[in-house]
Amino acid sequence: MEYSWLLDNFNYAKNLIDRNSFPNSLIITGNKSIGKEALALEISNYFLNANKSSYRGIYDNKNFTLVTNDENSKVIKIEQIRELLSKIYLRTDKRIIYIKDAEKLNISSANSLLKIIEEPPNGTKFILSTSKISSIIPTILSRCTIIKCHNPPDNKVNVLLTNKPNIGFDNYYVISKLNNKEINNSLYKNNFDLINNFFHDINEVIKSDENIINFAKKFSSYNIEQIINMILFIVINFQKYYINPQNSEFYSNNKALLREYNSEKLNFIYDKLISIKRNIDIIQNNETILFSICILFKKLSKS
């Protein structure tokens, strides 16, 4: 198992397979980018008795099918599930259907999947992975065995940063560990320059006459929902500090941005950010959203 902190999870699934008790449907859940996909592939590889040297070749196995959202879509569409169902009855001894980021199933695709997930053809097993298990409809949850993945220990975070260069900066677990002495500074630079630049620049805008329009343009090409998630994460952690001042490491390492905001202001910021996030698809202009966020912080810092 590539990620040692998931070895117990793998052994649990392996034992079920060895006892011929592997469930028809398995959900692997846990925080983003902690190895859920690797675990799903390892389990698939073992179930299919595939490549003994590496699970990475499983994608080339004719009895393994990956289902995930298309590059230009935020959801797994019902057409994808229908296409899957049209092929699922082709005869084979063993088959794995892996649904990655299963929280992206919309109501139609989830209900379509539900028709087959309870009683799939003989030898066919479903593995779903998700970082938002609350988004999976209850009727699917009730038909699945759930494996909860643990976060890696602090001294293993570098393994994630090395093997997953595209970790998003809304990855709450990893971001919360960035100030830990175990984190390799070069990996931090390579993977999280965007975070560093964003919070440095927004801080400059807040405390000076730096041009807000230039700031909005600079970061408008990035995923605006991830940016909002990151700010929400910072706000939540500052709120935790006000509740429990003794737990202040996060506050001490990040106070440059929010040191002027009391709990009441942070509540207000949180509510406004949630409102903006809900209306991203309506606004459809990243520069406008970033401009609004800067104005929000700037006004509150002076009030």
Image (cartoon, rainbow, N blue to C red):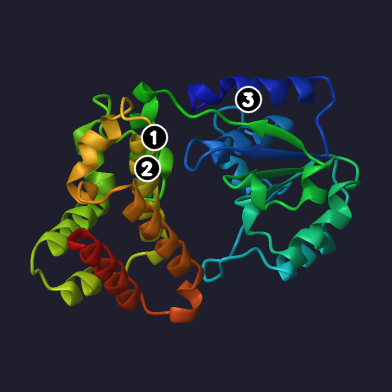
185 and 279: which is toward the camera: 279
- Specify whether 141 is left or right of 123: left
Callout 2 amino acid: Gln
Q: Which residue is mark 3?
A: 9
Q: Identify the residue at image location x=27%, y=73%.
A: 291
Residue 243's mark?
Answer: 1
Residue 142 appears in the picture as rendered: yes
Q: Whole-Å distance between the Cαs marked 3 and 1?
A: 34 Å
Packing grade of label 1 (10 A; few <14, some 14-19, many >=20) is: few
269 and 109: which is toward the camera: 269
224 and 77: which is toward the camera: 224
Q: Identify the residue at image location x=24%, y=49%.
A: 258
Q: Which is in the foreground here, disc 3 or disc 1?
A: 1
Determine the secondary structure under disc 2: helix
Q: Position of residue 186 (x, y in %)?
A: 20, 37
Callout 3 amino acid: Asn
Q: Which residue is mark 2?
A: 239
Q: Position of residue 281 (x, y in %)?
A: 50, 76
